[in-house]
Image (cartoon, rainbow, N blue to C red):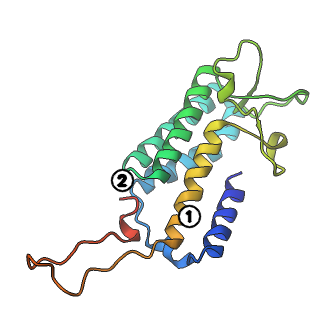
Amino acid sequence: MLIEVIVIGILVGLLTGGNLRRLGDIRLRGVELLFAAFIMQALVSSVSAWRPGLGHSLLLISFLLLLAGLSRNKPTPATALMGTGVFLNLIVIFTNGGMPVKIKAWPAGFNDHIHVQLSKTTSLPWLGDVITWPLPGFLGGLVSIGDILLSAGIFVLIVRGMKYQGLRRSKRPAANGQYDKIRSNRDMLS
């Protein structure tokens, strides 16, 4: 889903007059935390196959790192959407020992140590992967509310980042002799 959202965001940004180069002007704080979280999530399945409890802990820590990285940035619609999505996913994974998935026919022997089958005992089932995503993907294209909010935040960040030109400082000083301080792409997330 993440790849599709990035591609769609770039296409919408371009179709609405945005410039791909402007994305490079966005200053994102907490990049090291976000990078560490993505590395941890990439390792979860491998570590979980070896030590399931450790993999689950690694997954929860990665979500906490994502929240910490996002919180280091200025509140914007994009960071609010992303942070809310990550938080909702963290809560449902924490309470169920994995992301609950609504699958009618759970594949025999399937265990990626990240997902758990949705059942009558699932806590907060509406926060699990229960929404059908129209594009083909893992587990039949099922996503959670958290995934949708996270994706919406990424989409908003990309489209706004590509379109926002920023206003440069005024060439003429204001009446008080000071130049106007105007936002630029660099300030969108800092």
Q: Position of residue 125 (x, y in %)?
A: 69, 23
Name the residue tied to disc 1: 158
Image quadrant where one finds the C terminus = bottom left
Please name whichever residue, 26 or 117, is drawn nearer the observer in this view of the structure.
26
Going by the picture, which residue comes out furthest to the left? 176
> Can you give x and y, in whole percent of width and height, for residue 1 in the image?
71, 51
Q: Amino acid at mark 2?
A: Lys
Instruction: Please identify the quarter of the rendering in which residue 25 is found.
Output: bottom left
Label 2: how many Cα within 10 Å (few below 14, some 14–19, many 20+): some
Assign a secondary structure to mark 2.
loop
Q: Position of residue 163 (x, y in %)?
A: 52, 72
When asked about the image quadrant of residue 68, the answer is top left
Direction from residue 18 to residue 49 in the image, left or right? right
Task: Assess disc 1: are there few (<14), some (14-19) or many (≥20) residues with their C-alpha within 10 Å of its C-alpha.
Answer: many
Task: Name the kind of residue labelled 1 in the image.
Answer: Ile
Q: Residue at x 25, y 82 (%)?
A: 170
Q: Earlier in the sequence, mark 1 or mark 2?
A: 2
